[in-house]
Amino acid sequence: MHIKKIKAIKVFDSRGIPTLKTFVYTDNYITGVSIPSGTSAGKKEAVELRDKSKAFFGKDVTKAIDNVNKIIGPRLVGEFLLDQTRIDNLMIELDATSNKSRLGSNAILSISAAICKAASKELDVPLYQYIARLNNKKIDKKTNFPKPELNIINGGEHAGTDLAFQEFQILPNKNKISQNISMSAEIYLQLKEILSKKYGKSSINVGYEGGFAPNITDPKIALDLMEQAIKKSGYSKDVFLGLDCAANSFYNEKSKKYFVNNKNYSSSQLMEYYADLLKSYKQLKSIEDPFFEEDKNSWKEFTKKYSSKMNIIGDDLLVTNPKLIKEGIDKKYCNSLLLKPNQIGTITETIKSFNLARDNGWKVVVSHRSGETEDSFISDLAFGLNSDYIKFGAPARSDRNSKYNRLLEIEGVYLEE
Ligand code: PGA
Ligand code: ZN
């Protein structure tokens, strides 16, 4: 039950950009976890170490790999595998910065997650079970499955179009995860038919997270298309709508204006725009990053108005950071947390952020990044922590479906009635 060796290698994410896969060597196994990376990252995320050399337009990870293989790994050899908190704290101390900028959140998280998975293997329990144990909770197979938010139209920085909002999501609301994924895949294929008939075959090209990227600029058209697809599939009663506006990406810090559908909006005008959307689309029950991360008065006002009606999710605003989450709770900036392990950099801190949000009555959404690999660690994380929601992209492309398929496997095989 002790760490014998740690080794990182370079692998590639769904965008073709290098990332790390780190292996932990223990008595009986060699266990690897690869980690994701964002495109529209929040300003205060823990620092992902990139080489900034010519290779891969500055995005190579040889320094982060060296940090695992030459600095952190050797320091952790001999540590007890089940001491997740101690090991994470040792890495935080070794890094000795407030944002993991010396050793890199990518280097640190790849080890933290691989140790967690290696421990589950040596104990011969499923990963979700070990994560629940780390959090001192028991699994309830009836209530532990989260509800999915599936992004079936991509815009913002995730698509080659001028659609300002980044994600247009369907939120299926049945109890069983298999039913929810199945319904969503049917709606996805229905949307494909609608798009290709209406706009031609180029409209079914997809963005980073597997959602379609038609050449439209008006968010209302995207919502209309989704409503049609839901209705045609016969699921109008079972499916809500959600948005990740990712407003950082259409906010101009100089002019202090938001640019949506070829028009500039002040904060208060954007607030009116959202009011109109909520009036027109009664099914809209979730909104993420509606405002720029520093436009906190707008966040507060929005939450005051709509908190009882919908989930208002902080992603770039909170970056899975316990200090920022605490501020968000105290000042009522929003009512839900997007939980992304690589925004903070260790499993221990990820669980701490989860509990802080949950204990204060917030909803929690466990989320992928736009640059993903086939790794499904976050599925076990979501199920093991009993998160309210998951956000893993469209029900298409294996970088996304590896996560949904893992949950289907948990439901259909591990927890078979
Ligand atoms: P990112 O996008 O991974 O590119 O940051 C995901 C999100 O904004 O939720
Ligand atoms: Zn987001």
Image (spheres, helix red, strand yellow):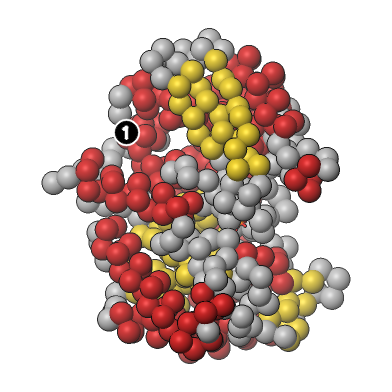
Label 1 amino acid? Pro
Seen at 41% across and 49% down, the residue is 402
Q: Is 97 in front, or is 49? A: 49
Seen at 32% across and 84% down, the residue is 232
Mark 1 beta carbon near ligand 1 (under 8 Å): no
Task: Quadrant for the N terminus, please.
Answer: top left
In the rendered image, the vertical position of residue 334 relative to residue 67, given as above or below = below
Mark 1 element type: loop
Crowd around label 1: few <14 · some 14–19 · many ≥20 (10 Å): some
- Is 134 on the left-hand or right-hand side of 329? left
Q: Quadrant of residue 239?
A: bottom left
Q: Residue furthest top?
A: 78
Q: Position of residue 259 (x, y in %)?
A: 73, 79
Seen at 52% across and 41% down, the residue is 350
Q: Residue furthest front?
A: 201
- Is 165 on the left-hand or right-hand side of 228? right
Q: Position of residue 8 (x, y in %)?
A: 60, 27
Q: Residue furthest left?
A: 417
In the rendered image, the vertical position of residue 146 relative to residue 197, given as above or below = above
Q: Position of residue 242 (x, y in %)?
A: 47, 72
Q: Position of residue 223 (x, y in %)?
A: 49, 82
Q: How many numbered marks, from 0 up?
A: 1
Q: Is 69 in front, or is 176? A: 69
Q: Quadrant of residue 104?
A: top right
Q: Quadrant of residue 118?
A: top left
**One can see residue 287 in this view:** no
Q: Residue furthest right?
A: 254
**One can see residue 171 in this view:** yes
Seen at 35% across and 46% down, the residue is 406
Judging by the rendered image, the residue that carries numbered circle 1 is: 126
- Is 369 on the left-hand or right-hand side of 162? left
